[in-house]
Image: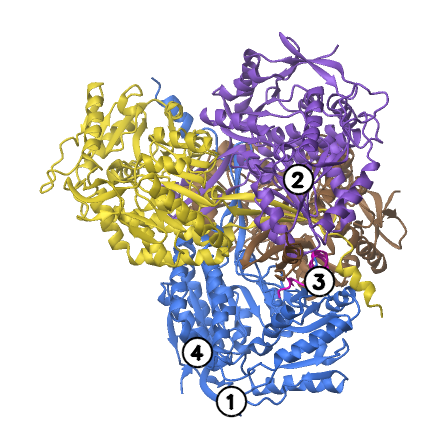
Chain colours: A purple, B yellow, C blue, D brown
Amino acid sequence: MKTIGHLISGKVTTEGQRSQDVYNPSTGEVLKQVLLASRTTVEEAIASAQAAYPAWRDTPPAKRARVMYRFRELLEQNAAEICRLIGEEHGKIVHDAMGELQRGIENVEYACGAPELLKGEHSKNVGPAIDSWSEFQPLGVVAGITPFNFPAMVPLWMYPMAIACGNTFVLKPSERDPGSTLFIAELLLEAGLPAGVLNVVNGDKEAVDTLLDDPRVQAVSFVGSTPIAEYIYNRASANGKRCQALGGAKNHAIIMPDADMDNAVSALTGAAFGSSGERCMALSVAVAVGDEAADAFIEKMTAQMQGLQVGAFDDRRNDFGPVITRAHQEKVVGYINSAEEQGAEVVVDGRDPKVPGYENGFFVGGTLIDRVTPEMVCYQEEIFGPVLLVVRVNSMQEAMDLIDAHEYGNGTCIFTRDGEAARYFSDNILVGMVGINVPLPVPVSYHSFGGWKRSLFGDLHAYGPDAVRFYTKRKTITQRWPSAGVREGAQFAFPS
Amino acid sequence: MKTIGHLISGKVTTEGQRSQDVYNPSTGEVLKQVLLASRTTVEEAIASAQAAYPAWRDTPPAKRARVMYRFRELLEQNAAEICRLIGEEHGKIVHDAMGELQRGIENVEYACGAPELLKGEHSKNVGPAIDSWSEFQPLGVVAGITPFNFPAMVPLWMYPMAIACGNTFVLKPSERDPGSTLFIAELLLEAGLPAGVLNVVNGDKEAVDTLLDDPRVQAVSFVGSTPIAEYIYNRASANGKRCQALGGAKNHAIIMPDADMDNAVSALTGAAFGSSGERCMALSVAVAVGDEAADAFIEKMTAQMQGLQVGAFDDRRNDFGPVITRAHQEKVVGYINSAEEQGAEVVVDGRDPKVPGYENGFFVGGTLIDRVTPEMVCYQEEIFGPVLLVVRVNSMQEAMDLIDAHEYGNGTCIFTRDGEAARYFSDNILVGMVGINVPLPVPVSYHSFGGWKRSLFGDLHAYGPDAVRFYTKRKTITQRWPSAGVREGAQFAFPS
Amino acid sequence: MKTIGHLISGKVTTEGQRSQDVYNPSTGEVLKQVLLASRTTVEEAIASAQAAYPAWRDTPPAKRARVMYRFRELLEQNAAEICRLIGEEHGKIVHDAMGELQRGIENVEYACGAPELLKGEHSKNVGPAIDSWSEFQPLGVVAGITPFNFPAMVPLWMYPMAIACGNTFVLKPSERDPGSTLFIAELLLEAGLPAGVLNVVNGDKEAVDTLLDDPRVQAVSFVGSTPIAEYIYNRASANGKRCQALGGAKNHAIIMPDADMDNAVSALTGAAFGSSGERCMALSVAVAVGDEAADAFIEKMTAQMQGLQVGAFDDRRNDFGPVITRAHQEKVVGYINSAEEQGAEVVVDGRDPKVPGYENGFFVGGTLIDRVTPEMVCYQEEIFGPVLLVVRVNSMQEAMDLIDAHEYGNGTCIFTRDGEAARYFSDNILVGMVGINVPLPVPVSYHSFGGWKRSLFGDLHAYGPDAVRFYTKRKTITQRWPSAGVREGAQFAFPS
Amino acid sequence: MKTIGHLISGKVTTEGQRSQDVYNPSTGEVLKQVLLASRTTVEEAIASAQAAYPAWRDTPPAKRARVMYRFRELLEQNAAEICRLIGEEHGKIVHDAMGELQRGIENVEYACGAPELLKGEHSKNVGPAIDSWSEFQPLGVVAGITPFNFPAMVPLWMYPMAIACGNTFVLKPSERDPGSTLFIAELLLEAGLPAGVLNVVNGDKEAVDTLLDDPRVQAVSFVGSTPIAEYIYNRASANGKRCQALGGAKNHAIIMPDADMDNAVSALTGAAFGSSGERCMALSVAVAVGDEAADAFIEKMTAQMQGLQVGAFDDRRNDFGPVITRAHQEKVVGYINSAEEQGAEVVVDGRDPKVPGYENGFFVGGTLIDRVTPEMVCYQEEIFGPVLLVVRVNSMQEAMDLIDAHEYGNGTCIFTRDGEAARYFSDNILVGMVGINVPLPVPVSYHSFGGWKRSLFGDLHAYGPDAVRFYTKRKTITQRWPSAGVREGAQFAFPS
């Protein structure tokens, strides 16, 4: 059985004492083993990054970017293999994996722009013959800790830009589906990255805490659940590190009476059930304004869901695959049960999906629950499964109050044709990423990703322009020159 | 005796139970009383700011800026009174207070540019007929906690930009010299700021902790010593607030053998002794490369210091005034004593300055100490007094290693004529603000202020472009419109 | 009778041989004389600007900006007098003059941001130890030629930013209403501008051609009619000068069937008749989509126009005043006549307005003409009077085709509630300034003003960010230092 | 014999009536024929570009950029063939051609950043509930006319960015070495560019004038000699097109007494003789400050030039190759003759180089001429050959006056170690691209290229950030929505 190791100083090592099973969630079987790094192994990776830093820092940004151009080519050339690895460990269908990879590639493309993005501001004559300018210098060794749900994309949110900015990197990916992450990291080395600039350690809390406590690590980027995000942020901050930690979400869509209902239903189908709802930008709550809109939405969505196909990752005809573990499957079903018990109406029930040939897979079918209220557990917590809740309200303001009252503030959207409603909503809603008739308003790679409230801890958002600021520190230089220099010297030294 | 109160909801209140003496450090006498706010009073100020927020947030940035233009005029018109207030409570000489105020005004000027600075990025066609843009929205209620050494300037680093960005503000200035701070805040209200948008509470730890713990406060800016900065940062962060906390410094100047020595001596005289050295950007260590440079520097500096005049704030002929308290005076003298005991050479001794007519003032004279080594206490800690240490090294690299090894990384400078030396230094030194033949490389108001290492906790620097980012949060909107809208409707509805 | 002279080298001179009458258009009487500069006088002004250039160029941008802050204060303090001068020479009502002045002040505010706006881009390590940065340096002497319709605002579009960028300036305002322009220029000198940095010459074609031909003038900004704009642009360009020349307009508003009709009528009343329609952003053509919309619009607009009050400038109850000259009054009436002759329907007829007590004033009343077609002269040419044409079309696309086919492309707007229609319109229409439910989409001062097609000759728009680029030229510096410098020298020279 | 044709609508056509010889300048033999397009052919290319425009304009920038990523890969993969084509038609040595291509690729890389570079500015609340933003929209069909000396690089300065911005393009390359240019254009189509988006027509004045006069062409970029640049600029401008036209140069290097002379000589050898001096950034005049510096420079340069190897393009050991034509060879020799006749001293004489086996090639050897004065023809005109002139002056100011007095202001540099001299020089010199110890200060691709004075006609520089502005036009949209929209409607329609 294959063992997934660590990438340190340019080499994959598979020595180690502790390991953990990696499952194929479509079959429920153990597929591989992944090593869990000890503190010593993580420190070795940090030391490797530290050693590689001085030379990489001094490499011109344009040369650093050139490695990213080649990396981008290799990602395109190896897309099929990457998607296969994602699929067999995570369970997402090939087309969905390809979408994930494409988003990741776009972050590599943004990192290719490092020479432009690292420009500082230059001011001539801040005083008489005094100039001043800013530089955005790299931090040193930085670390990334990433979740299981996007094993290719989320790491690519982080290290391409961190590295293009001149840092060196230690990545701790999810131990549940580490295969594609390691494979992609090796491609970056193949693209010409010097050994030690990117290191990957697989592991669990021991690895995480080592990264959080080691004084050589200057900054930590994290994506995961809110409790862990908060833990990471507080511990890293207390240790004097820069940190950005992205947590959970409960993303609502408002369905206005004037919405293009076919469009809304079609958009929400993908946004709610795609990738089994295991996305921090999944749209998991539809808030219908008025019963008329609610009834129309429920009717059309129910019809639309008849065609939803759940199944194994390697059959492109499937719409979505299993959830990540048996335990998570049970947790999602538990939320549906609790909704029912607390008085909601399960309109489409995915608790017992049939997936012939994959009876042991961790599947949950697409589920639609109407008449959900804010008091219910299913509403308050992030389900992270293919479950769409419908809440009915009487006015747009009521819908907005609901969203603003929720703990999370990652993404949201509104379906309307009306310019004024859209503007009022996007202006006032207390959410970081807002869609207008766009159900998954994930910012493109040249904007930045970040929620509000307890969905993000830190000042700066992920990827895009904010990532440049996160992975660099500002230095401001003020310069004047003594007046009696070589210039006048020359003037007097050689009179005609 | 005058009692300095709080400014809450547009009114100055002088009711309260606890108060503290405010001294005139030039005479050593108690001058006024300052109230120390209870938790209840601080919460009242926060509530006032919270109530003022919605309307202020919706006021167009250009209108918010217009208040700053008028504020700027009032600051210029009231400069004499402001400087008098600073002088009698802090002790700095009138011309120095004027310099401080001018720097503060420049921050108000920068805030006048809010309409330009708040522009977001707009991307057409991030996908087919899909647009996306970012907005930098205000945070809500934010707080500032400021030190005694710049009672006018440091608050002006904070609230003009915070307010111009649409936030409302609660300021907790130093209780040692609160007079000018409150006076200036009243001018901003006179300039047309709605009541409640800026509130000032005087106080001590109780006030500070209330600001750090109240959930309505979204962000905290702090300037002070490193231990307090660290405390503030960790507590505010743990409470989910955005925070930037600026701490202490030990700023070194490298004197290269090719330096214009007259220029260096002249520049360092002001940088070391101005404002009695009570500046986080004071240049307190001169590192001379080679004994030849050291000897020349000591000789010229000793001569220059003969002319230094220490005395009361209201005599413009004085170069600098007293330190802030009796206790601080004793602490500074203690550092000089320890230097002497640990083997350094006190070349010019300011431990017993004569200031006729002000025998009880908290004065320390300009002091020059040669042959200081890194092991000495006077080198390791921030003295915050008119004391210049000289360290002798053999090479520029040795000088740089010394700087990089120090706990602080606020400011530094090099004196040289050589382009290459200057570039190598500014590129590599681990300090946030670098001067090349500029001894106090305080960035101008349109750049940002911030040290590295333990001189600043937080991701973003103070004032300038970084302040815009600190006082706003990013929202990203992605928008598409349903295709079958009014447009095609019209097209088909009215055929010719 | 008062004679208006020139401002050269900081002094107003009233010597000169040729002069011209300045009228009060409300009464039709000659009010003052204005001198018309000879070639020699203009050259004197250029020489003054040339002499003032080197010192002004080297003045730090923050100091240059400080003059603008004071200028801003003086404009506010002298607003009443400025508006009186505008009113008596131009005829616009006091409240309209105040609006013009306010817009001008906003341009001064933008110029206050020069230190921020002049920042260049700094790139560290474009190669190994090689840095590169850009500077935006001033051009030298630049000239502005401005029209009668905004004697305060349009000059303020130009010289504040030009001067804040470090240039010196020669202004040639309209000879029809030169009083306020000269008065304002004197305020800038009072604000502390060194003599010669701003010069004003009144004159006609001789003055204009001198500015266009003199090799010391580096750039020319012009606002006026399209034939003159084209002449200016070609002659200045052929002489090697940078030039931006803004010409005429014919701004259309599309009234969609879903428009908020009350809002549209109210908005268009001001946009069509304000300042007697003598604005290059006047909305002079309403394009109604469908007869239903057209009929409703005509009905409501006719009712609204009953309340329109035309009269003398100094009565605030008036909505608009006279046109600029007797000849222009006759020209406007001629357009109305021709419309009628060519088959359009004059719904509201302003050809013979009654203005008791001002029987000799150059008045035209508000005029509404329905059923205008693209072949009519009144449609093809810019009327520059209080005349609103209505064209009826059957679809939004037809309305857009009409706009795109017109010679001019200055401003346009659409009235709709529909997000999709607005987005399609603003994306595709061949016009530089687009309003969505905003009838006069004049960009705010921190954006830039410019039409497309034959409404603007040149690459860069007026005021705002583009003005910074227009009034500066890019210099790019690439720097490396020889490696064997003082740094290593020091290292070896002083071994331990 | 091969005939080089046109690329129109995605296909290479070789039909045509007029053609011209293409030489191998290393052998002096005719190598190929190139077709010269008639007016009809050029119009066909314009029509093709016009037809391709609407769809390409609406293609999202990220998709347009993706074509550039693939183009970049193809350029790297086909580098050898491209360099061979450049070499055999132009004569430059393979390593020099590779350098040219690399610079071109860097411009493609910059164009890959289009999504970032096309961001407009978004302002929330320019008034109450009114927003405004700018868009940078493409122009339509734009044309490029390029010179013989960089057949690969200069076209790549233009069309990648123009196309990435959404324009379609017609390129008219030099008819002397059109092979590599056409080959590269075909690679872009292979990369996935839709047919018609890039068209190439070979030709002479007839083709050029057609491009300048056709109303469908919106803008023209040109690089060539100053007289032609001026002609192009004036004719295009008069036709209402946007134009940037780059002309000739005479780039001076100041050798200061404190210069690192070995570095200066080494740097200038490449800068003066590389590519036979046929570069608009060639360093053709060395200005030595003081006879001591001059003598040392002459001595070391003379020694260095002994090793210079001139010869055929395909031998990598050669330093530079032939000039472009027999006529140009004679012209260069004529300049050397005239220098000698006018009193200068030909220190190293390249008028009769020996290139065994290539006796008919158009070779001129490296030539060094001392004691040149400003009155000489060789000083006043651009030689465009491997000839380095030395002028002796007595002071840095004298050197600067010389540079400022010259007609051209493309590039310049100074050799010094002194920070103050460098700063004074770069601040004040009237030249657009300045090097400090960098002899060929060609800005990197993410800055912009442009000279001052008669070296560039137009407002905006080539490539880099300025190219984004040149190839787009600003549109500013101001938006508000009627208040009584769907939002409140919903609010009242569905009360609880």
Left or right: B178 with respect to B44?
left
Amino acid found under the numbered disc labelled 1? Gly
Image coords of residue B75 (percent x, y)? 32, 55
Q: Which class describes the residues within 10 Å of circle 1: few (<14), some (14-19), or many (20+)?
A: some
Between disc 3 and disc 2, the foreground one is 2
Q: Residue at x 51, y 74 (%)?
A: C96
Report whether residue C82 is seen: yes
Residue topped by disc 1:
C28
Label 2: how many Cα within 10 Å (few below 14, some 14–19, many 20+): many
Residue A492 visible here: no
Q: Residue at x 53, y 49 (%)?
A: C475
Residue C495 position within the rendered picture, expressed as x and y whole percent measured from the top left: 35, 19
Chain letter of mark 3 equals C
Seen in the image, is A184 located left or right of residue A145? right
Instruction: Tell me the chain of label 1.
Output: C
Is label 4 in a helix, a strand or a loop? helix
> Disc 4 marks which residue?
C84
The subunit carrying tag 4 is C
Instruction: Determine contact: label 2, label 1, CB under 8 Å.
Output: no
Question: Is residue B419 positioned above or below B199 on the image?
Answer: above
- Find numbered disc 2 in the image and state the secondary structure of the residue it sits on: loop
Can you give x and y, in whole percent of width and height, for residue C53 in the image? Answer: 43, 60
Residue B10 or residue D402, whichever sits in front:
B10
